[in-house]
């Protein structure tokens, strides 16, 4: 399994600058549409935990997809369904088969 997983996971866009090109646009409605970033190159089954720079848990994402769909979107909301603040965030990816991986990303609004 480790040889199949030769690309490292990453977050896109990084940094998030208030919008991403892949976010859906709202049709015939005023206001801001959905905000999201994507975690890509994920193993088939994993858990992603997102933390503030102070180590507070912001959100936990569960990915149970196929190898061909190795990504999961996050709507930039905390586990309490509040919009997250701009800043630096740390993520920790954990997979039973492949171990763990960590990284960071920034949100700029």
Image (cartoon, rainbow, N blue to C red):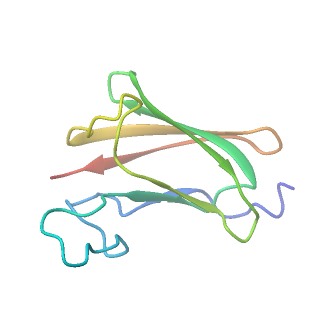
Q: Position of residue 46 (x, y in %)?
A: 69, 44
Quadrant hosting residue 65? bottom right
Please tell me which residue is depicted at 26% across the width and 72% down the height of the picture: 26
Residue 94, compared with residue 19, is above or below; it is: above
Residue 18, compared with residue 81, is above or below; it is: below
Q: Position of residue 34 (x, y in %)?
A: 31, 60
**Is the N terminus in the top left, top right, bottom left or bottom right quadrant?**
bottom right
Please tell me which residue is depicted at 34% across the width and 41% down the height of the picture: 77
Q: Position of residue 108 (x, y in %)?
A: 19, 52
Q: How many marks?
A: 0
Q: Is residue 74 left or right of residue 6?
A: left
Residue 101, compared with residue 32, is above or below; it is: above
Q: Is residue 73 left or right of residue 9?
A: left
Quadrant hosting residue 5? bottom right
Please tell me which residue is depicted at 27% across the width and 38% down the height of the picture: 84
Q: Residue furthest front?
A: 28
Please tell me which residue is depicted at 25% across the width and 78% down the height of the picture: 27
In front of the other: 11 or 22:
22
In front of the other: 29 or 35:
29
Residue 49, compared with residue 68, is above or below; it is: above
């Amino acid at each position: 399994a480790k040889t199949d997983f030769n690309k490292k996971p990453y977050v896109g866009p990084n940094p998030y600058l208030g919008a991403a090109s892949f976010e859906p646009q709202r049709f015939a409605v005023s206001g801001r549409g959905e905000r999201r970033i994507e975690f890509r190159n994920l193993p088939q089954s994993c858990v992603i935990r997102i933390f503030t720079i102070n180590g507070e848990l912001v959100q936990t994402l569960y990915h149970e997809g196929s190898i061909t769909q190795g990504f999961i979107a996050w709507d930039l909301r905390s586990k309490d369904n509040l919009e997250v603040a701009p800043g630096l965030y740390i993520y920790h990816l954990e997979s039973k088969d492949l171990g763990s991986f960590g990284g960071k990303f920034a949100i700029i609004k």
